[in-house]
Amino acid sequence: MTQTAKSSRKFRSTVPMLVGFTTVFVLIGALGAWAMRTEIAGAVVASGRIVVEKNRQVVQHLDGGIVDEILVREGDQVEEGALLARLDPTLIQSELTIIEGQLFEVMARNDRLQSELSETETVSFDQVLEEEAETRPEVAGIMQGQERLFRARLDTLERSVTQLQNQRLQLEKQITGIDAQATALERQRELIGEETTSQQTLYERGLAQASRLLGLQREEARLAGQIGELEASRAQAMERIAELEIEELSLHAQRREDAITQLRDMEFREMEMAERRTALIEQLSRMDIRAPVGGVIYDLRVFGASSVIRPADPVMYIVPQDRPLIIEARVDPINVDEVYTGQEVMLRVAAFDMRDVPDLFGEVIQVSADAFTDEQTGASFYRARIQLPETELDKLPEGQVLVPGMPVDAFIRTQDRTPAAYLMSPLTRYFDKAFRDG
Protein backbone atom coordinates (compact mmCIF):
# COMPACT_ATOMS: atom_id res chain seq x y z
CA MET A 1 0.00 0.00 0.00
CA THR A 2 1.35 3.37 -1.00
CA GLN A 3 1.92 6.35 1.29
CA THR A 4 -0.83 8.31 -0.47
CA ALA A 5 -3.40 5.64 0.22
CA LYS A 6 -2.51 5.52 3.90
CA SER A 7 -2.89 9.29 4.24
CA SER A 8 -6.26 9.24 2.51
CA ARG A 9 -7.54 6.53 4.83
CA LYS A 10 -6.36 8.43 7.94
CA PHE A 11 -8.10 11.63 6.81
CA ARG A 12 -11.35 9.82 6.22
CA SER A 13 -11.30 8.40 9.76
CA THR A 14 -10.56 11.81 11.38
CA VAL A 15 -13.30 13.81 9.62
CA PRO A 16 -16.22 12.41 11.67
CA MET A 17 -14.30 13.02 14.88
CA LEU A 18 -13.63 16.63 13.93
CA VAL A 19 -17.26 17.13 13.00
CA GLY A 20 -18.36 15.69 16.33
CA PHE A 21 -15.99 17.85 18.36
CA THR A 22 -16.99 20.90 16.37
CA THR A 23 -20.66 20.18 16.98
CA VAL A 24 -20.06 19.76 20.72
CA PHE A 25 -18.08 22.99 20.92
CA VAL A 26 -20.76 24.85 18.98
CA LEU A 27 -23.51 23.50 21.27
CA ILE A 28 -21.51 24.37 24.38
CA GLY A 29 -20.86 27.83 23.03
CA ALA A 30 -24.48 28.35 22.11
CA LEU A 31 -25.65 27.07 25.50
CA GLY A 32 -23.15 29.31 27.25
CA ALA A 33 -24.22 32.30 25.22
CA TRP A 34 -27.85 31.51 26.06
CA ALA A 35 -27.03 31.08 29.74
CA MET A 36 -25.13 34.34 29.84
CA ARG A 37 -27.49 36.50 27.84
CA THR A 38 -31.00 35.10 28.44
CA GLU A 39 -32.90 36.45 31.50
CA ILE A 40 -35.39 34.35 33.44
CA ALA A 41 -37.98 35.91 35.75
CA GLY A 42 -37.16 35.15 39.39
CA ALA A 43 -39.77 34.32 42.00
CA VAL A 44 -40.10 33.33 45.64
CA VAL A 45 -42.58 30.51 45.91
CA ALA A 46 -44.84 30.57 48.96
CA SER A 47 -47.91 28.63 49.95
CA GLY A 48 -50.88 30.43 51.41
CA ARG A 49 -54.62 30.60 51.76
CA ILE A 50 -57.39 33.06 51.02
CA VAL A 51 -58.72 35.14 53.89
CA VAL A 52 -61.06 38.13 54.05
CA GLU A 53 -59.91 41.59 54.98
CA LYS A 54 -60.83 42.02 58.68
CA ASN A 55 -61.54 38.28 58.57
CA ARG A 56 -64.88 36.76 59.51
CA GLN A 57 -67.49 38.48 61.63
CA VAL A 58 -68.63 36.60 64.71
CA VAL A 59 -72.34 36.62 65.56
CA GLN A 60 -72.96 36.29 69.29
CA HIS A 61 -75.57 37.19 71.87
CA LEU A 62 -74.86 39.27 74.95
CA ASP A 63 -77.30 37.54 77.29
CA GLY A 64 -77.78 34.08 75.80
CA GLY A 65 -81.02 32.18 76.08
CA ILE A 66 -83.18 29.48 74.53
CA VAL A 67 -83.46 29.43 70.74
CA ASP A 68 -87.01 29.80 69.47
CA GLU A 69 -86.29 29.80 65.74
CA ILE A 70 -83.32 29.55 63.35
CA LEU A 71 -83.94 31.37 60.07
CA VAL A 72 -80.69 30.67 58.17
CA ARG A 73 -78.61 27.71 57.13
CA GLU A 74 -74.93 27.13 56.47
CA GLY A 75 -73.85 28.92 53.30
CA ASP A 76 -76.83 31.29 53.08
CA GLN A 77 -76.16 34.77 51.72
CA VAL A 78 -77.54 37.45 54.05
CA GLU A 79 -77.72 41.23 54.04
CA GLU A 80 -76.66 43.47 56.89
CA GLY A 81 -79.43 43.62 59.51
CA ALA A 82 -81.12 40.44 58.28
CA LEU A 83 -82.89 38.37 60.95
CA LEU A 84 -80.79 35.27 61.62
CA ALA A 85 -82.41 33.74 64.70
CA ARG A 86 -84.93 34.51 67.39
CA LEU A 87 -84.70 33.64 71.08
CA ASP A 88 -87.62 32.55 73.27
CA PRO A 89 -88.80 35.60 75.26
CA THR A 90 -91.10 33.67 77.64
CA LEU A 91 -88.86 33.66 80.72
CA ILE A 92 -87.80 37.28 80.34
CA GLN A 93 -91.36 38.38 79.66
CA SER A 94 -92.55 36.61 82.81
CA GLU A 95 -89.82 38.24 84.88
CA LEU A 96 -90.62 41.62 83.34
CA THR A 97 -94.31 41.20 84.23
CA ILE A 98 -93.41 40.48 87.86
CA ILE A 99 -90.94 43.36 88.06
CA GLU A 100 -93.38 45.79 86.45
CA GLY A 101 -96.12 44.77 88.87
CA GLN A 102 -93.81 45.45 91.81
CA LEU A 103 -92.49 48.65 90.26
CA PHE A 104 -95.93 50.09 89.50
CA GLU A 105 -97.06 49.21 93.02
CA VAL A 106 -94.07 51.07 94.47
CA MET A 107 -94.56 54.01 92.11
CA ALA A 108 -98.24 54.34 93.04
CA ARG A 109 -97.38 54.08 96.72
CA ASN A 110 -94.68 56.75 96.36
CA ASP A 111 -97.13 59.03 94.56
CA ARG A 112 -99.62 58.53 97.37
CA LEU A 113 -96.95 59.28 100.00
CA GLN A 114 -95.83 62.34 98.07
CA SER A 115 -99.40 63.58 98.00
CA GLU A 116 -99.69 63.00 101.74
CA LEU A 117 -96.47 64.93 102.23
CA SER A 118 -97.80 67.80 100.12
CA GLU A 119 -101.17 67.57 101.94
CA THR A 120 -103.16 67.63 98.71
CA GLU A 121 -106.77 66.55 98.46
CA THR A 122 -106.14 63.90 95.79
CA VAL A 123 -103.27 61.68 94.65
CA SER A 124 -101.22 63.01 91.74
CA PHE A 125 -99.94 59.93 89.89
CA ASP A 126 -96.90 59.73 87.62
CA GLN A 127 -97.55 60.13 83.89
CA VAL A 128 -96.10 56.66 83.27
CA LEU A 129 -98.73 55.12 85.53
CA GLU A 130 -101.49 57.12 83.87
CA GLU A 131 -100.43 55.84 80.44
CA GLU A 132 -100.02 52.25 81.59
CA ALA A 133 -103.42 52.29 83.30
CA GLU A 134 -105.11 53.03 79.98
CA THR A 135 -104.13 49.64 78.56
CA ARG A 136 -103.40 47.55 81.66
CA PRO A 137 -106.26 46.93 84.10
CA GLU A 138 -103.90 45.68 86.81
CA VAL A 139 -102.12 49.05 86.87
CA ALA A 140 -105.45 50.85 87.09
CA GLY A 141 -106.35 48.57 90.02
CA ILE A 142 -103.09 49.44 91.79
CA MET A 143 -103.80 53.15 91.40
CA GLN A 144 -107.36 52.76 92.65
CA GLY A 145 -106.11 50.86 95.69
CA GLN A 146 -103.68 53.64 96.57
CA GLU A 147 -106.39 56.25 96.05
CA ARG A 148 -108.68 54.40 98.47
CA LEU A 149 -105.87 54.14 101.01
CA PHE A 150 -105.09 57.83 100.58
CA ARG A 151 -108.73 58.75 101.09
CA ALA A 152 -109.06 56.47 104.14
CA ARG A 153 -105.96 57.93 105.77
CA LEU A 154 -107.08 61.45 104.93
CA ASP A 155 -110.54 60.76 106.38
CA THR A 156 -108.95 59.44 109.58
CA LEU A 157 -106.82 62.56 109.83
CA GLU A 158 -109.76 64.84 109.16
CA ARG A 159 -111.88 63.09 111.81
CA SER A 160 -109.10 63.46 114.35
CA VAL A 161 -108.65 67.11 113.43
CA THR A 162 -112.42 67.66 113.60
CA GLN A 163 -112.55 66.17 117.10
CA LEU A 164 -109.77 68.47 118.22
CA GLN A 165 -111.46 71.45 116.61
CA ASN A 166 -114.77 70.57 118.31
CA GLN A 167 -113.03 70.37 121.66
CA ARG A 168 -111.41 73.72 120.97
CA LEU A 169 -114.77 75.19 120.01
CA GLN A 170 -116.30 73.94 123.27
CA LEU A 171 -113.44 75.44 125.24
CA GLU A 172 -113.82 78.72 123.42
CA LYS A 173 -117.51 78.72 124.35
CA GLN A 174 -116.59 77.96 127.94
CA ILE A 175 -114.19 80.87 127.88
CA THR A 176 -116.94 83.08 126.52
CA GLY A 177 -119.23 81.97 129.38
CA ILE A 178 -116.46 82.46 131.91
CA ASP A 179 -115.81 85.94 130.58
CA ALA A 180 -119.52 86.75 130.86
CA GLN A 181 -119.66 85.41 134.42
CA ALA A 182 -116.53 87.27 135.35
CA THR A 183 -117.93 90.49 133.92
CA ALA A 184 -121.16 90.07 135.90
CA LEU A 185 -119.31 89.25 139.11
CA GLU A 186 -116.97 92.16 138.56
CA ARG A 187 -120.03 94.43 138.22
CA GLN A 188 -121.53 92.98 141.38
CA ARG A 189 -118.27 93.53 143.19
CA GLU A 190 -118.19 97.14 142.07
CA LEU A 191 -121.72 97.69 143.38
CA ILE A 192 -120.93 95.90 146.64
CA GLY A 193 -117.83 98.01 146.90
CA GLU A 194 -119.81 101.21 146.54
CA GLU A 195 -122.37 100.03 149.12
CA THR A 196 -119.59 98.97 151.48
CA THR A 197 -118.01 102.41 151.20
CA SER A 198 -121.37 104.06 151.96
CA GLN A 199 -122.00 101.79 154.96
CA GLN A 200 -118.48 102.43 156.22
CA THR A 201 -119.18 106.18 156.26
CA LEU A 202 -122.50 105.69 158.02
CA TYR A 203 -120.90 103.28 160.49
CA GLU A 204 -118.25 105.80 161.34
CA ARG A 205 -121.02 108.33 162.03
CA GLY A 206 -122.90 105.79 164.11
CA LEU A 207 -125.75 105.61 161.70
CA ALA A 208 -125.17 101.98 160.53
CA GLN A 209 -124.77 98.67 162.25
CA ALA A 210 -121.45 96.81 162.23
CA SER A 211 -123.11 93.55 161.19
CA ARG A 212 -124.39 95.15 158.03
CA LEU A 213 -120.92 96.46 157.16
CA LEU A 214 -119.30 93.11 157.83
CA GLY A 215 -121.89 91.35 155.67
CA LEU A 216 -121.10 93.60 152.76
CA GLN A 217 -117.38 93.05 153.21
CA ARG A 218 -117.89 89.27 153.26
CA GLU A 219 -119.95 89.44 150.07
CA GLU A 220 -117.27 91.53 148.39
CA ALA A 221 -114.62 88.99 149.39
CA ARG A 222 -116.76 86.11 148.10
CA LEU A 223 -117.23 87.84 144.75
CA ALA A 224 -113.49 88.40 144.49
CA GLY A 225 -112.97 84.70 145.14
CA GLN A 226 -115.45 83.69 142.45
CA ILE A 227 -113.82 86.06 139.98
CA GLY A 228 -110.45 84.47 140.79
CA GLU A 229 -111.87 80.99 140.20
CA LEU A 230 -113.28 82.09 136.86
CA GLU A 231 -109.93 83.53 135.85
CA ALA A 232 -108.25 80.24 136.79
CA SER A 233 -110.83 78.28 134.79
CA ARG A 234 -110.28 80.60 131.86
CA ALA A 235 -106.51 80.09 132.06
CA GLN A 236 -106.98 76.32 132.12
CA ALA A 237 -109.27 76.50 129.11
CA MET A 238 -106.74 78.61 127.21
CA GLU A 239 -104.00 76.18 128.10
CA ARG A 240 -106.13 73.28 126.84
CA ILE A 241 -106.80 75.14 123.59
CA ALA A 242 -103.05 75.56 123.12
CA GLU A 243 -102.60 71.83 123.73
CA LEU A 244 -105.29 71.03 121.16
CA GLU A 245 -103.57 73.25 118.61
CA ILE A 246 -100.31 71.43 119.25
CA GLU A 247 -102.07 68.08 118.90
CA GLU A 248 -103.54 69.18 115.57
CA LEU A 249 -100.13 70.30 114.34
CA SER A 250 -98.68 67.02 115.58
CA LEU A 251 -101.20 65.02 113.57
CA HIS A 252 -100.13 66.79 110.37
CA ALA A 253 -96.46 66.60 111.30
CA GLN A 254 -96.71 62.89 112.11
CA ARG A 255 -98.40 62.27 108.78
CA ARG A 256 -95.63 64.09 106.92
CA GLU A 257 -92.93 62.37 108.96
CA ASP A 258 -94.39 58.94 108.22
CA ALA A 259 -94.55 59.83 104.52
CA ILE A 260 -90.93 61.01 104.49
CA THR A 261 -89.71 57.89 106.28
CA GLN A 262 -91.52 55.56 103.92
CA LEU A 263 -90.52 57.58 100.85
CA ARG A 264 -86.86 57.32 101.78
CA ASP A 265 -87.00 53.53 101.54
CA MET A 266 -89.51 53.27 98.73
CA GLU A 267 -87.70 55.67 96.39
CA PHE A 268 -84.58 53.50 96.58
CA ARG A 269 -86.66 50.42 95.78
CA GLU A 270 -88.32 52.25 92.90
CA MET A 271 -84.94 53.19 91.46
CA GLU A 272 -83.69 49.59 91.69
CA MET A 273 -86.82 48.17 90.06
CA ALA A 274 -86.83 50.83 87.34
CA GLU A 275 -83.25 49.93 86.43
CA ARG A 276 -84.12 46.24 86.41
CA ARG A 277 -87.18 46.92 84.24
CA THR A 278 -85.07 48.91 81.78
CA ALA A 279 -82.53 46.09 81.62
CA LEU A 280 -85.25 43.52 80.94
CA ILE A 281 -86.83 45.68 78.24
CA GLU A 282 -83.44 46.04 76.56
CA GLN A 283 -82.93 42.30 76.89
CA LEU A 284 -86.30 41.69 75.24
CA SER A 285 -85.28 43.97 72.38
CA ARG A 286 -82.30 41.68 71.80
CA MET A 287 -84.39 38.56 71.27
CA ASP A 288 -83.85 38.97 67.52
CA ILE A 289 -80.32 38.10 66.42
CA ARG A 290 -79.48 40.08 63.30
CA ALA A 291 -76.56 40.09 60.90
CA PRO A 292 -73.96 42.73 61.85
CA VAL A 293 -72.62 42.67 58.27
CA GLY A 294 -73.66 41.24 54.95
CA GLY A 295 -72.04 38.02 53.79
CA VAL A 296 -72.20 34.24 53.80
CA ILE A 297 -73.22 32.21 56.86
CA TYR A 298 -70.32 30.08 58.04
CA ASP A 299 -69.72 27.69 60.95
CA LEU A 300 -73.30 27.68 62.24
CA ARG A 301 -73.24 26.50 65.88
CA VAL A 302 -77.00 26.26 66.53
CA PHE A 303 -79.24 24.00 64.48
CA GLY A 304 -82.72 23.95 65.96
CA ALA A 305 -85.26 25.30 68.41
CA SER A 306 -84.81 24.80 72.16
CA SER A 307 -81.03 24.94 71.83
CA VAL A 308 -79.35 26.88 74.61
CA ILE A 309 -76.98 29.74 73.84
CA ARG A 310 -74.60 30.81 76.56
CA PRO A 311 -73.86 34.53 76.96
CA ALA A 312 -71.30 35.86 74.44
CA ASP A 313 -70.78 32.41 72.87
CA PRO A 314 -70.45 32.41 69.05
CA VAL A 315 -73.74 31.51 67.39
CA MET A 316 -72.36 31.59 63.84
CA TYR A 317 -69.91 33.47 61.68
CA ILE A 318 -70.46 35.64 58.63
CA VAL A 319 -67.83 35.88 55.90
CA PRO A 320 -68.18 39.35 54.34
CA GLN A 321 -68.34 39.41 50.55
CA ASP A 322 -67.84 43.13 50.02
CA ARG A 323 -64.32 43.29 51.39
CA PRO A 324 -61.05 42.77 49.49
CA LEU A 325 -59.73 39.22 49.25
CA ILE A 326 -56.38 38.78 50.93
CA ILE A 327 -53.93 35.91 50.52
CA GLU A 328 -51.79 35.15 53.55
CA ALA A 329 -48.65 33.43 52.29
CA ARG A 330 -45.88 31.80 54.28
CA VAL A 331 -42.43 32.95 53.17
CA ASP A 332 -39.34 30.92 54.05
CA PRO A 333 -36.98 32.95 56.27
CA ILE A 334 -34.10 32.50 53.78
CA ASN A 335 -36.17 34.28 51.11
CA VAL A 336 -37.74 37.03 53.20
CA ASP A 337 -35.05 39.53 52.16
CA GLU A 338 -36.37 39.26 48.60
CA VAL A 339 -39.96 40.07 49.54
CA TYR A 340 -41.15 43.64 50.02
CA THR A 341 -44.30 45.73 49.74
CA GLY A 342 -45.45 46.47 46.22
CA GLN A 343 -44.10 43.31 44.58
CA GLU A 344 -46.14 41.67 41.86
CA VAL A 345 -47.38 38.19 42.70
CA MET A 346 -48.71 35.50 40.40
CA LEU A 347 -51.32 33.34 42.09
CA ARG A 348 -52.55 29.88 41.31
CA VAL A 349 -55.53 28.48 43.19
CA ALA A 350 -54.85 24.84 43.93
CA ALA A 351 -58.56 24.04 44.09
CA PHE A 352 -59.08 24.99 40.42
CA ASP A 353 -57.93 23.18 37.29
CA MET A 354 -55.03 25.18 35.83
CA ARG A 355 -56.34 24.54 32.33
CA ASP A 356 -59.64 26.25 33.11
CA VAL A 357 -58.54 29.11 35.36
CA PRO A 358 -55.87 31.59 34.21
CA ASP A 359 -53.17 32.89 36.49
CA LEU A 360 -54.25 35.71 38.77
CA PHE A 361 -52.03 38.62 39.73
CA GLY A 362 -51.90 40.48 43.00
CA GLU A 363 -49.59 42.71 45.00
CA VAL A 364 -47.74 42.35 48.30
CA ILE A 365 -49.23 44.85 50.75
CA GLN A 366 -47.52 43.76 53.97
CA VAL A 367 -44.66 41.62 55.25
CA SER A 368 -44.57 40.67 58.93
CA ALA A 369 -41.85 42.34 60.97
CA ASP A 370 -40.90 39.09 62.70
CA ALA A 371 -41.10 35.40 62.07
CA PHE A 372 -43.93 33.14 63.21
CA THR A 373 -43.64 29.53 64.30
CA ASP A 374 -45.95 26.75 63.17
CA GLU A 375 -47.13 25.09 66.38
CA GLN A 376 -47.55 21.73 64.67
CA THR A 377 -44.31 21.49 62.68
CA GLY A 378 -42.14 23.98 64.55
CA ALA A 379 -41.08 25.57 61.25
CA SER A 380 -40.48 29.32 61.13
CA PHE A 381 -41.99 31.56 58.47
CA TYR A 382 -42.76 35.16 57.67
CA ARG A 383 -46.31 36.16 56.79
CA ALA A 384 -46.83 38.08 53.57
CA ARG A 385 -50.24 39.60 52.87
CA ILE A 386 -51.14 39.76 49.20
CA GLN A 387 -54.12 41.74 47.95
CA LEU A 388 -56.07 40.50 44.96
CA PRO A 389 -57.72 43.34 42.97
CA GLU A 390 -61.39 42.93 42.11
CA THR A 391 -60.54 43.20 38.41
CA GLU A 392 -58.67 39.89 38.64
CA LEU A 393 -61.84 38.16 39.82
CA ASP A 394 -63.38 38.87 36.43
CA LYS A 395 -60.93 36.36 34.94
CA LEU A 396 -62.59 33.50 36.78
CA PRO A 397 -64.91 31.33 34.71
CA GLU A 398 -68.61 31.44 35.49
CA GLY A 399 -69.42 29.41 38.57
CA GLN A 400 -65.90 29.64 40.01
CA VAL A 401 -65.80 31.61 43.27
CA LEU A 402 -62.92 32.29 45.61
CA VAL A 403 -63.87 31.59 49.21
CA PRO A 404 -61.86 31.98 52.40
CA GLY A 405 -59.69 29.02 53.26
CA MET A 406 -58.79 28.01 49.69
CA PRO A 407 -55.10 27.05 49.30
CA VAL A 408 -53.08 29.23 46.95
CA ASP A 409 -49.58 28.98 45.47
CA ALA A 410 -47.99 32.42 45.37
CA PHE A 411 -45.08 33.24 43.05
CA ILE A 412 -43.66 36.50 44.36
CA ARG A 413 -41.67 38.01 41.51
CA THR A 414 -38.06 38.95 42.27
CA GLN A 415 -35.16 40.29 40.17
CA ASP A 416 -34.64 38.73 36.69
CA ARG A 417 -31.46 36.64 36.41
CA THR A 418 -29.67 34.62 33.74
CA PRO A 419 -29.51 30.81 33.84
CA ALA A 420 -25.78 31.12 34.48
CA ALA A 421 -26.46 33.23 37.56
CA TYR A 422 -28.86 30.58 38.84
CA LEU A 423 -26.24 27.86 38.25
CA MET A 424 -23.41 29.86 39.81
CA SER A 425 -25.45 31.08 42.79
CA PRO A 426 -24.83 28.01 45.01
CA LEU A 427 -21.09 28.07 44.21
CA THR A 428 -20.91 31.80 44.83
CA ARG A 429 -22.60 31.42 48.21
CA TYR A 430 -20.36 28.50 49.11
CA PHE A 431 -17.11 30.26 48.29
CA ASP A 432 -18.33 33.50 49.85
CA LYS A 433 -19.02 31.64 53.09
CA ALA A 434 -15.77 29.70 52.83
CA PHE A 435 -13.70 32.84 52.38
CA ARG A 436 -15.50 34.53 55.27
CA ASP A 437 -14.96 31.53 57.57
CA GLY A 438 -11.31 31.47 56.55
Image (cartoon, grey):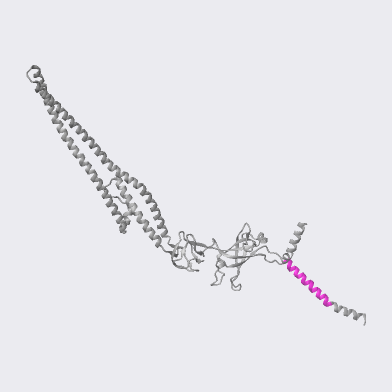
Image-based side of 313 in relation to 211, left or right: right
In what quadrant of the picture does the N terminus appear? Answer: bottom right
Query: Is 3 contained in the magenta span?
Result: no
**Residue 292 horizontal side relative to residue 271, left or right:** right
**Main SS class of the magenta portion in the image:** helix
Q: Quadrant of residue 195?
A: top left
| Left or right for 180, reference 140 | left
Which quadrant of the figure has residue 350?
bottom right
Does the image show residue 194? no
Q: Residue at x 21, y 39 (%)?
A: 168
Q: Position of residue 226 (x, y in %)?
A: 16, 30
Q: Which residue, as the protein is rendered here, is positioned at the far front?
A: 211
* Residue 47: image location, x then y, percent: 62, 65
**Total marks placed:** 0
State whether residue 431 appears in this view: yes
Above or below residue 398? Residue 277 is: above
Judged from this view, the residue extending furthest toward the left is 207
Residue most extreme to the bottom: 1
Q: Nearer the viewer, residue 289 or 277?
A: 277
Horizontal and vertical percent position of residue 163:
22, 43
Position of residue 250 measured from the top left corner of the image (x, y, whole percent): 28, 41
In the drawing, does residue 328 fall left or right of residue 35?
Answer: left
- Please say whether residue 28 is one of the residues in the magenta stretch: yes
Q: Observer-nearest residue: 372 or 158?
A: 158
The residue lying toward the viewer, choosing from 342 and 266, is 266
Q: Residue furthest top?
A: 205
Which span is picked out in magenta? 15-37
